[in-house]
Structures are given as structure tokens and as C-alpha cells.
Image (tube, rainbow, N blue to C red):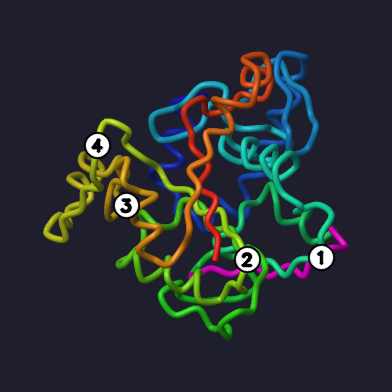
Amino acid sequence: MKDIISWVLRHVPRKYLQLVSHFGVKVLSVFYRGKGVECSVCGSEFRKFLPYGRSGRDNALCPSCLSLERHRLMYLYLQRKTPFFKANLKLLHVAPEYCFIDRFEKMKNLDYITADIESPLAKVKMDIHQIPFEANTFDVAFCNHVMEHVDDDIKAMSELYRVLKPGGWAIIQSPQDWSRAETFEDPTITDPKEREKHYWQDDHLRLFGRDYGKRLEKGGFKVTEDRFVMNELSPEEVKRFALPANEVIYFCQK
């Protein structure tokens, strides 16, 4: 199963996977029934989660809602540390994840807008370098695993900052190499195999290091690097929800 999923992710364009993958995964859910893990997003329980990723991470993908480790962590964070589920908020969700879209659309406290340059799941087609909304429009923005793909990450970050209202906040996550003090990017690396070698994936344009929060600050944000999973969740919760044990939540405020 791990090898099949890895092959699909490498060879099928993401926009097509976003349209059809949930059908196939839901069929597989029958074979994963059990009580070993729980999805914090949809509440489903399984003996384990599906493998996922080009390198085939074990226990990663929820067969019911398609949440990954980072999505389950973010959902818990929103529940426990923000007013997201109670306050009236205008939300911009860039590159919206399948596991969140229906849930957020049904929340009566949200004015919810999805946007992306190519995702068939998003309602607004946009380039994040030039977000087509007025300054001070949104209370909240989510933008996860996007900044490693864009031509100019600081410009994209500054655009998210621009469209947030004063006092607004964003969660902006990206893959990070914790062994690197500084982000690595080299515009001369254009070969897909070389990009995968240096950036972990052939469609990435950089690999963020421990300075990721500083780059977000260059976009204008006040950044809190919240070690929520390490400092506030028990080992039992980390195991039960299959969370990324070392991930830092980048809570960005205007």
C-alpha cells in the first residue's frame, strides 16, 4: 500500500488527486476499522491511519476525511487555543485542504472564502503574490504548505499580511528542515530530480530552516512559534491522534 500511494503521488497531478482521491480512500477505510487511532478532525477511529507521502510515512492519512498529521494538529490547536469555533470571522483559506472545506463551510460563524491558483477545490482563482482583495478584509487566514512552492515567499507572506485586518491572525505552515539554521534556495536549481534532492520534492523552490519564523516576520507579521504539541499535549494524545511530534505552529498576527 505504501508503494502504491507513493507512486500515485509522484505521477498523478495534484489537481486530479484532489478531485477523486477521497473516493478510493473511503473504500480502503473498511479495512482499517479499529480503535488504535482517532482523527481529531472528523472523530473517526481506525486501527491505524493509511501511509502517505512520496517517502511513505506510516500512520498518516485518515481514511475518512483525508486529514494528515498536520491537519489533525491544527484542528486541535484551533479548538484549544483560538476563538475560531465561536467568534464571527471572515476567513481566507489559501490552498484549502479537503478535510476542512465542508466543515468550515457549515460553520455559521464563518464567512469562508477558499482561494488558490489551480486547485479545483477553491472557489476563487488567484495568485498569492497578488491577492485580489482589499487591505484589511479578513479576520483570519490559513495558508499551509504553499510557501515552499511560490516564486517569492516574502511577497506572498506580505500579501497575506496586507489583507488581514488589524488584530487579525493567520496560521502559515511549511515543511522545515530543523537541521538547517537558514532556509536554502537556489534559483539555478531547475531540474526536478535536483529539486527533490535539495528541497524534498520536485515542485518545491526552497527548503525552510529554523529561520522560517523570521521570514514570516519579514512579511510584516508578529510571529509566535508555538510548541503546542511538545509542551501542551500528552504523549497519549500525540499517539492517539498520530500527530507530528516536532511541528511548531506559526501563529502570525497583524
Classify mark 1: helix, strand or loop: loop
> Mark 4 — residue?
180
Query: Neighbour class for label 4 at 10 Å: few (<14), some, many (≥20)?
Result: few
Task: Decide if residue 68 is on the left or right side of residue 195.
Answer: right
* Separation of marks 4 and 3 at Cα, in angstroms: 16 Å
**Highlighted magenta segment, given as a residue range:** 107-117
Q: Could you say which disc has been placed on residue 236 in the image?
A: none
Q: Residue 102's spot in the image, x, y percent?
A: 77, 55
Query: Neighbour class for label 3 at 10 Å: few (<14), some, many (≥20)?
Result: many
Mark 1: amino acid:
Asn
> Mark 1 — residue?
88
Task: Decide if residue 17 is on the left or right side of residue 211.
Answer: right
Q: Residue 6's spot in the image, x, y percent?
A: 43, 33
* Separation of marks 4 and 2 at Cα, in angstroms: 30 Å
Are the residues tagged 4 and 2 within 8 Å (C-beta)? no
Task: Decide if residue 165 is on the left or right side of residue 250.
Answer: right
Q: Residue 212's spot in the image, x, y percent?
A: 36, 48
Query: Neighbour class for label 2 at 10 Å: few (<14), some, many (≥20)?
Result: many
Which of the two marks, 2 or 1, is nearer to us in this view?
2
Our reading of the magenta stretch's main secondary structure is: strand
* Separation of marks 2 and 1 at Cα, in angstroms: 12 Å
